[in-house]
Image: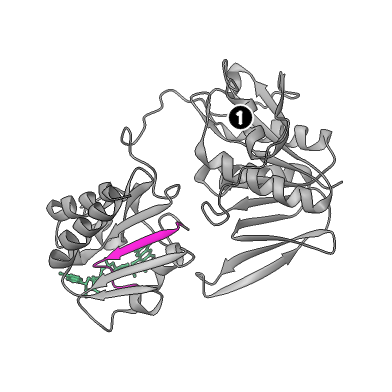
Amino acid sequence: MGDILAFADQQDGEIRGVALEIVSVAASRAAKLGGSAHALILGGDGTGKDASGLGAYGAEMVWVARDESLTHYIPEVYAPVVAEVARSGNYDAILFPATARGKDLAPRVAALLDTSLASDITRLDVEDGTLVAVRPVYGGKAFARIKFQGFPTVMSLRLNAFGVAESPASGKVQIMTPPVKGAGRSRVIEFQASRGGTMDVSEASIVVSGGRGMRGAEHWTLLEALRDALGSDAALGASRAVVDAGWRPHGEQVGQTGKTVAPKLYFAIGISGAIQHLAGMRTAQTIVAVNKDADAPIFGVADYGIIGDAFEVLPRLTEEISDYCSNG
Ligand code: FAD
């Protein structure tokens, strides 16, 4: 016991950045439990060329299940494979990222293993030799501490809530054919990336979100300039009012009916701070709000608040940040 299995997601055969955080968490908690971290990659031909790289983040063993049937994510094909690999080890926990895919896959695997599940956790402690998870409830207004019965337990981890940590381990890679072949009831005909090159809001460590206070899609150039000044780890987000108005795509919506984010830094520009928006971002490490209404609820959760007109504040903020970044 004490071992932890991390689901290391890939896209087009390459390990996704989110996997590094999941493997890092698996490694640090497994070390406290007296076990080791293993990673599991599923994919089609050629997947896993970069698998040994997970050793740098603490994976002792990296299982790569390779098969044409695993080229695209199909839940009923992926879930039995993950469950079978989980059964073959002596794992205390199976960790997934709380991405759309991870949140879809984790409960399926838990059901196949007939074990407990904790979704979207933001903390994972080791107490008296067992894992204790913490997850936000009631839209982030309270936190539940969860102890588990039965092993292995299955969890999905909120991205950016834990961070990536290097801790060298052997990173031994074992390529295998999938131990079971799930019967797919669906077939992926085509895969279209939403927009080339831009980082997904749920994976970014810095998020620049705009609300109705930005007055129209044409003013997003101001937010894009701030995002660009903050570097390649920054992404754009939006409130639902903005998405409903058609100013931004739904993929950028943050909140109860959008994406949940936990970046290191979150900018809320012209966003009032409705409870449904807060549900998606209040676990961000640092929140900066810009709003011309001093009584806007967003200031209740903000670490830094600027009371002012976004159209005056944004160019100055972007300039300051650009200067700061270019001066190292
Ligand atoms: P508003 O509430 O209109 O706020 C605009 C803000 O901009 C105001 O605070 C104003 O003072 C400020 N402002 C105006 N002009 C300027 C300026 N020039 N400079 C600076 N500040 C300015 N919302 C989400 O965001 N995500 C969700 O996932 C979500 N899910 C929902 C689910 C349900 C079931 C329901 C009922 C609602 C949901 N909502 C969600 C909607 C939510 O209740 C709010 O309506 C929405 O978040 C408001 O968006 P907003 O803050 O952009 O707009």
Residue 95 lies in the magenta-colored region: no
Span of residues in magenta: 263-273
User: As rendered, which of 154 and 22 lies closer to the eye?
Assistant: 22
Q: Is residue 214 left or right of residue 101?
A: left
Residue under label 1: 53
Residue 266 in the image: above or below residue 196: below
Q: Is residue 22 left or right of residue 81?
A: left
User: As rendered, which of 209 and 148 lies closer to the eye?
Assistant: 209
Q: Residue at x 42, y 48 (%)?
A: 204
Q: Residue at x 76, y 32 (%)?
A: 85
Q: Amino acid at mark 1?
A: Gly
Q: Is residue 285 left or right of residue 144?
A: left
Dividing the image into four equal quarters, which quarter contains ligand 1? bottom left
**Rendered location of residue 103, percent (x, y):** 57, 48
**Rendered location of residue 318, percent (x, y):** 21, 57
**Rendered location of residue 6, percent (x, y):** 67, 41
Q: In the picture, residue 130 is in which quadrant?
A: bottom right
User: As rendered, which of 98 and 321 lies closer to the eye?
Assistant: 321
